[in-house]
Image: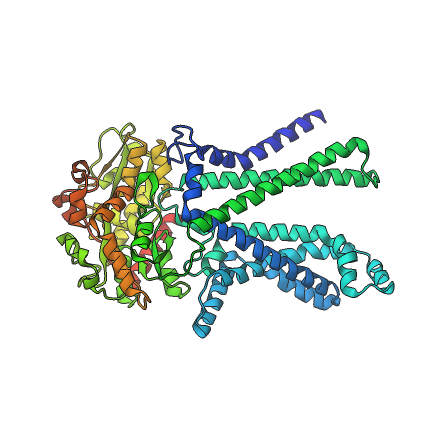
């Protein structure tokens, strides 16, 4: 028995460790001096201070709290009434209703999210309403409702119906009898249903993402869209605060519940004087936890108010951009959005996406309306083909004349009527100088047997095939089936030396030396090199992908002139310089380039020479049949 007890304790200890170790690491890194998720460089409280100044995060957190409380409260009220009604039904009717009730619980969230989005888009087209707070609230009530019903129904079955009937016989009105007799007996089920609804609503991402439209962001959506490069350490700070607050409340509630249960078991009808101090202490702790919760919520709401989330109506410009892709005032830089709002007397509704495909899907579905979007080259050509973009009035964008010649007419926008380039860069090799025997200069390094198990590869079909195409001497926009099959064979051959396929995980793995070689984007490589000086970047001799992200105005924009003013503002020399210095990508504007430090101008990572650039291809949107072939081949490669 003793051995079993020790084993049990060890087992529980291991379980607790694996459950809570990641949370403890997150809390520890909320005090990290640098932005690295892998290297702890020093202790600081600065991220907690910056958290309170971050408009985007605080606004999203406030939205999450208000949505969770509102949807949970409404779902609880509706769920309790529904549970009472179901309990009074006949056996067959109750069984049928319960089967329907289980559907949202068993249904995959993505199916629920997409189906509700389609319903809301239908009503949007029919009634002219927009997706936002209201549609998210309806969606959250819908998926929370079953949990309330399933928590309350068992409690209703435990209630002696004779007590309720006795109350009615004694002259108590039905409604009063319900609140005085029934409600106290099912209160634990109601509280459980409310807490589950609150938790699920606060944590939900998938359903919210599909039903939020544009402009309304909860914290999970904001976090998701911010991980294109790295999770902002302010998110770590926020997560630490929320975790510790919830943990405190749970401990206090559980202790109080345990004490109440012990008193009930002993049949104590009153509190003895000897235990009164403990009761007072327990109640004081609960009051303190509640006060802490009110303080945090109130502080978030106040900061949200101060940051302008509750200001009077102004012209609204809706912008859809990549995460961490504009100077936001951190580290003494310029807050570009705030500066534009002040100069033009408007409000910028600034939303984020993490992939071109995610952005395209949201626009194409009709669930969101934006004025400006900043996609990549191949996606732009697709959007032009599908008539999703407005032609620009360059009279409103005078700074466009300073675009470098090589970016004025491109393969994705041959006439130059739809876009103004925002940034550009190349895909190359980032490698650890302490782990490779000699500096690589070819994509062949990603097939080198000497580094077996230390090589990372893109988990992205277009980029992965692009590397194989350059290595084999093909165009990265080839539609030749034989060439694509040859590339697939080359990628299959590579699998035996790979550690894994990754995307953003490249940051952590390269920074802490878990891998020797990886392909990645030049601007992000500079960010990694700042964190780990042992890293270096090279543009392979075979050439690579030269990518361009450009600013476009969406077809049907209600604020086209203001949108063009925004594009022009982003091309202002000082504004462009602030953006480039923050994101580390390359500028297509000569006026901005001239303002950069000479060290930056001469950096071959950001600004490779013309000879190497000439060997690079700009992606364009491929024919549907080619895209399907590439995706089928890629699925086959990954599955092997």
Whole-percent x, y for residue 336 in the image: 30, 49
Q: Residue furthest toward the bottom?
A: 126
What x and y, as percent, mark residue 199? Answer: 57, 49
Locate residue 165: give its quadrant. Answer: bottom right
Give the quadrant of residue 333: top left
- Residue at x 58% of width, y 40% of height: 292
Q: Point out residue 66 in the picture as x, y percentages from the top left corner.
A: 53, 53
Q: Is residue 144 left or right of residue 96?
A: left
Foreground residue, 528 or 217?
A: 217
Tag count in the figure?
A: 0
Taking the spot 16% from the left edge, 46% from the top edge, the residue there is 613
Residue in the image at 79% along x and 38% along y: 263
User: Is 300 displayed left or right of 435 in the figure?
Assistant: right
| Residue at 73 percent of width and 33 percent of height | 278
What percent of the width, then of the height, locates residue 30?
45, 35
> In the image, is residue 371 above or below residue 276?
below
């Amino acid at each position: 028995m003793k051995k079993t007890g020790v084993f049990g304790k060890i087992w529980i200890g291991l379980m607790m460790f694996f459950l809570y170790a990641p949370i403890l690491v997150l809390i520890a890194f909320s005090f990290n001096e640098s932005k690295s998720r892998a290297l702890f460089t020093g202790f600081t409280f600065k991220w907690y201070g910056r958290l309170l100044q971050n408009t985007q995060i605080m606004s999203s957190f406030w939205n999450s709290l208000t949505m969770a409380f509102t949807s949970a409260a409404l779902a609880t009220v509706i769920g309790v009434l529904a549970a009472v009604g179901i309990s009074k039904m006949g056996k067959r009717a109750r069984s049928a209703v319960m089967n329907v009730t289980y559907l949202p619980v068993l249904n995959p969230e993505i199916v629920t999210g997409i189906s509700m989005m389609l319903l809301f888009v239908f009503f949007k087209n029919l009634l002219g309403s927009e997706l936002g707070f209201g549609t998210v609230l309806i969606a959250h009530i819908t998926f929370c409702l079953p949990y309330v019903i399933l928590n309350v129904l068992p409690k209703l079955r435990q209630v002696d119906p004779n007590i309720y009937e006795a109350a009615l016989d004694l002259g108590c009105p039905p409604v009063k009898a319900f609140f005085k007799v029934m409600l106290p007996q099912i209160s634990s089920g109601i509280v459980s249903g409310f807490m589950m609804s609150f938790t699920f609503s606060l944590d939900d991402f998938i359903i919210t993402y599909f039903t939020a439209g544009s402009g309304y962001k909860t914290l999970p959506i904001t976090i998701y869209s911010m991980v294109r490069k790295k999770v902002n350490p302010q998110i770590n700070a926020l997560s630490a605060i929320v975790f510790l607050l919830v943990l405190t409340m749970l401990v206090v509630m559980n202790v109080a519940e345990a004490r109440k249960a012990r008193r009930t078991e002993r049949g104590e009808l009153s509190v003895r004087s000897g235990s009164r101090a403990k009761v007072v202490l327990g109640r004081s702790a609960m009051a303190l936890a509640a006060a802490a919760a009110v303080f945090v919520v109130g502080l978030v709401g106040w900061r949200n108010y101060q940051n302008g989330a509750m200001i009077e109506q102004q012209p609204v410009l809706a912008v859809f951009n990549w995460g961490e892709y504009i100077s936001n005032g951190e580290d003494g830089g310029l807050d570009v959005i705030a500066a534009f709002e002040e100069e033009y007397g408007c409000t910028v509704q600034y939303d984020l996406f993490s992939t071109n495909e995610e952005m395209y899907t949201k626009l194409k579905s009709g669930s969101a309306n934006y004025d400006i979007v900043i996609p990549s080259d191949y996606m732009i050509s697709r959007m032009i083909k599908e008539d999703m973009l407005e032609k620009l009035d360059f009279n409103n964008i005078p700074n466009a004349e300073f675009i470098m010649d090589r970016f004025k007419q491109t393969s994705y926008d041959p006439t130059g009527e739809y876009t103004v380039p925002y940034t550009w860069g190349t895909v190359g090799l980032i490698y650890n100088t302490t782990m490779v025997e000699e500096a690589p200069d070819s994509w062949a390094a990603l097939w080198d047997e000497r580094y077996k198990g230390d090589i990372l590869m893109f988990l992205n079909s277009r980029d992965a095939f692009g590397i194989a195409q350059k290595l084999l001497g093909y165009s990265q926009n080839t539609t030749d089936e034989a060439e694509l099959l040859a590339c697939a064979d080359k990628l299959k051959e590579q699998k035996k030396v790979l550690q894994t396929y990754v995307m953003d995980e490249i940051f952590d793995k390269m920074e802490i030396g878990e891998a020797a070689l990886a392909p990645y984007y030049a601007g992000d490589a500079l960010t990694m090199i700042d964190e780990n000086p042992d890293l270096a970047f090279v543009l392979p001799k075979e050439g690579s992908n030269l990518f361009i992200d450009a600013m476009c105005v969406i077809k049907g924009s209600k604020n086209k002139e203001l949108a063009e003013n925004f594009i022009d503002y982003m091309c202002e020399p000082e504004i462009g310089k602030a953006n480039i210095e923050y994101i580390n990508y390359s500028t297509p504007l000569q006026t901005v380039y001239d303002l950069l430090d000479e060290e930056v101008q001469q950096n071959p990572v950001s600004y490779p020479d013309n000879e190497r650039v000439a060997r690079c291809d700009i992606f364009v949107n491929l024919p549907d049949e080619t895209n399907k072939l590439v995706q089928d081949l890629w699925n086959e490669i990954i599955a092997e």
